[in-house]
Image: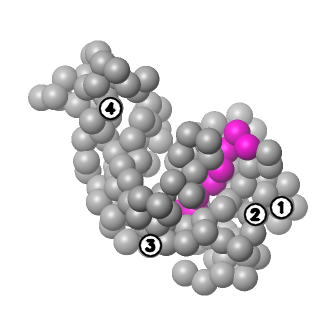
Amino acid sequence: MTWWLMKSEPDVYGIHHLQQEGSTLWDGIRNYQARNFMRTMQPGELAFFYHSNARPPGIVGLMEVLETGLTDPSQFDPASKYHDPASKPEAPRWDCVRMGYRRTFGRMLSLDDLREQFDPDTMPVLRRGNRLSILPLPDASAERILDLLGESR
């Protein structure tokens, strides 16, 4: 099983939004590498929900991949900030996945905590210049995160 770290700004879409809704389309991804990571996701895989652009940023919860291979509807919506006029319904550029809420952790594992426990090779979010919103995680790193939080799958 592949583990993921998926970032979102909490004031735009935070773990509390996902908890209320139960599931959501993870749409609006406009980076080809992040899109390609989404294309490899499989239902049942787990992802850490990371609050980015927050004070402090960090891992706040767990979610599950429910559906994959979905077309991102926001690319066709002229009112959306994610509208892509070059993308056509017969040949869409952008995909999305449906994510389901699993749980909110009792505490946040902050970016500073991650820096203390991991290096950039084992925690991709620590790599200099890395701004991707979707990152695969090594199994050992995912298990270590759960251990640090006193959580289980």
Q: Which residues are magenta?
A: 47-54
Whether residue 140 is visible, yes or no, is no
What residue sits right under mark 4 in the picture? 74
Residue at image x 74%, y 63%? 108
Q: Point out which mark residue 1 bears.
A: 3
Q: Nearer the viewer, mark 3 or mark 4?
A: 4
* Mark 2 element type: strand
Cα distance between the residues tagged 3 and 4: 29 Å
Residue at image x 47%, y 61%? 20
Does 8 sit left or right of 26 as displayed?
right
Q: Residue furthest front?
A: 20
Using a 10 Å C-alpha cutoff, classify the residue at mark 2 as few (fewer than 14 neighbours), some (14 to 19) or many (20 or more).
Answer: many
Using a 10 Å C-alpha cutoff, classify the residue at mark 3 as few (fewer than 14 neighbours), some (14 to 19) or many (20 or more).
Answer: few
Residue at image x 66%, y 81%? 151
What residue sits right under mark 1 in the picture? 113
Cα distance between the residues tagged 2 and 1: 6 Å
Coloration mode: one colour
Q: Point out which mark residue 100 bears.
A: none
Whether residue 12 is visible, yes or no, is yes
Does 77 sit left or right of 137 as displayed?
left
